[in-house]
């Protein structure tokens, strides 16, 4: 990635962004503090799992993908119709330029417009930059699942976060 992040545009994440989105996903995985996953999914698996109205990419002025955000249902039970879980990934060279915040803003806007009242996620406690980013966007820590899973042979904790919509009631 050699492009500048001076100006960015948030748009719908589509198949045309697949290669870059999955590459950024893999970069996050390779850093070791993004997810329990060890490889990025195929585009087909990603596309099938993510809600089409709640996935966005950040593009620079040259159209390069700087990062992405997407949400999935947490349950098919009707009681949870207004709850989604999200993931957000920013290319390492584009971090600290407002990309993550812009992506979270886009997700919040799309979910609130759809009547979704809770966005949640789980973050490794070592991923302090992500925890800070989410707290600045109005997410709160609701607890920690201790030793919830093994990752590269070590037990990992996961900090649970959520954002409750102040407008969707």
Image: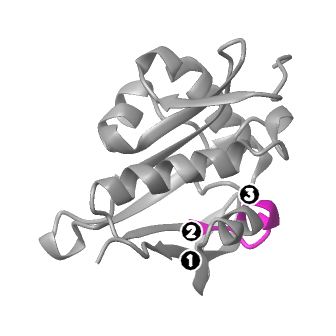
Q: Which residue is mark 2?
A: 122
**Residue 87 can be seen in this image:** yes
Label 2, label 3: how far apart the Cα atoms are: 11 Å
Q: Which residue is mark 1?
A: 160
Quadrant containing the N terminus in the rendered view: top right
> Label 2's element?
strand
Closer to the eye: label 2 or 3: 2
**Residue 37 can be seen in this image:** no
Residue 114: numbered disc: none
Tell me which numbered mark, 1 or 2, is placed earlier along the sequence: 2
Tell me which numbered mark, 1 or 3, is placed earlier along the sequence: 3
Q: Which residue is mark 3?
A: 33
Residues 73 and 139: in front is 139
The x, y position of residue 4, in whole percent, is: 84, 22
Q: Is residue 167 left or right of residue 145?
A: left
Residues 60 and 55: in front is 60
Kindly indicate whether the residue at mark 2 contacts the one at mark 1 (C-beta within 8 angstroms): yes
């Amino acid at each position: 990635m050699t492009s500048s992040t001076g100006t960015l545009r948030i748009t719908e994440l589509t198949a045309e962004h697949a290669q870059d989105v999955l590459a950024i996903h893999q970069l996050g995985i390779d850093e070791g503090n993004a997810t329990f996953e060890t490889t990025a999914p195929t585009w087909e698996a990603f596309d099938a799992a993510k809600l089409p109205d709640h996935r966005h990419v950040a593009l620079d002025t040259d159209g390069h993908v700087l990062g992405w955000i997407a949400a999935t249902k947490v349950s098919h039970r009707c009681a949870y119709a207004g709850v989604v879980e999200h993931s957000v990934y920013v290319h390492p060279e584009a971090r600290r330029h407002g990309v993550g915040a812009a992506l979270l803003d886009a997700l919040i806007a799309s979910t609130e417009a759809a009547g979704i009242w809770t966005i949640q996620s789980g973050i490794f406690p070592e991923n302090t930059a992500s925890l800070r980013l989410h707290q600045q966007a109005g997410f709160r820590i609701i607890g920690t699942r201790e030793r919830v899973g093994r990752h590269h042979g070590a037990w990992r904790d996961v900090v649970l976060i959520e954002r409750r919509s102040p407008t969707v009631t």
